[in-house]
Image (cartoon, helix red, strand yellow):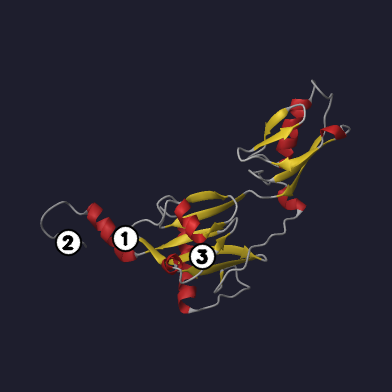
Amino acid sequence: MPNRSFVSLFSLALCACGGGIGLDQNSTAVRVAQALPPPDQTVTAADFTNYRIGALDVISVTVFDAPELAREGAVDEAGNFAMPLVGSVQAGGKTPQELGDAIATKLKGRYLKNPQVAVNIKEARARTVTIDGSVVQPGVYPIVGKMTLQQAVATARGANESADIDKVIVFRTVSGQKMAAMFNLRDIRSGRYADPEVYGNDIVVVGENSARRFFRDATMSFPLLARFVPVL
């Protein structure tokens, strides 16, 4: 079942898109745009305090008083990071502090008496997209390389039987402002419009055809009798 907060947000954006209305940019609501620019790319060091390292992120590891153990490179697709002496260390899912502590634990005693390890994020490549609404398998999915809107929906095993693929809304934060734009997936599939790129932290919500949903729910709930029954 779609997340209710996403459904409410979808309804708000859908009304605005359909009516050609621009929402107040000074409000906390979503700003509706005809097209979405790329999201914010600048990430400050403070943003990485609670950041969870992911596959393909580029990190640097510094061991104080042991410069020969310094290492910089990408986390592999399994979430592992190779370090001198201690070998492969699970980095995926850990904060920089947690990874530093894990490496220090492996070094302590056997190699160094009291190792101090610092981990810094050099490049955050681990990205996810949330796909919700009328899709077969809603969820949060990783983005590896570039992903288009069609590919994003396909990742969630496609639109379900009650979907309205003419109304697919993408939510994105641009310059600190939450924005939304609606796309017609049917026209994109036919080549009438370009297939837009989906970025990390985007939320994609596929609309629902209310008539199809009613028919689906009705066929599931009505008794299997060869006669009409009241619906109210």
- SS at mark 2 in the image: loop
Position in image of residue 53 (x %, y %):
67, 43
Q: Give the residue pinned by disc 3.
A: 195
Q: Quadrant of the C terminus?
A: bottom left
Indicate which disc, 3 or 2, sits on the residue closer to the N terminus.
3
Q: Is residue 150 above or below residue 50?
A: below
Label 2 neighbour load within 10 Å: few <14, some 14-19, many 20+ = few
- SS at mark 3 in the image: loop
In front: label 3 or label 1 = 3
Q: Is residue 213 above or below residue 27?
A: above
Residue at x 44% of width, y 61% of height: 206
- Marks 1/2: CA–CA distance: 18 Å
Q: In the figure, residue 215 lies in which quadrant?
A: bottom left
Q: In the figure, residue 42 lies in which quadrant?
A: bottom right
Q: What amino acid is found at the position of numbered circle 2 in the picture?
A: Pro
**Depth check, front residue: 47 or 126:** 126
Left or right? Give the position of 25 relative to 219. Answer: right
What label does residue 230 carry, if any? 2
Position in image of residue 61 (x %, y %):
78, 39
Q: What amino acid is found at the position of numbered circle 3 in the picture?
A: Asp
Q: Give the residue pinned by disc 1.
A: 213
Number of numbered discs present?
Answer: 3
> Which residue appears farthest toward the front when viewing the image?
191
> Which residue appears farthest toward the right when viewing the image?
65
Position in image of residue 181 (x %, y %):
53, 69
Whether tag 3 and tag 1 are in contact, CB under 8 A, the answer is no
Position in image of residue 45 (x %, y %):
76, 51
**Depth check, front residue: 71 or 112:** 71
Left or right? Give the position of 99 relative to 172. Answer: right
Label 3 neighbour load within 10 Å: few <14, some 14-19, many 20+ = some
Q: What amino acid is found at the position of numbered circle 1 in the picture?
A: Arg
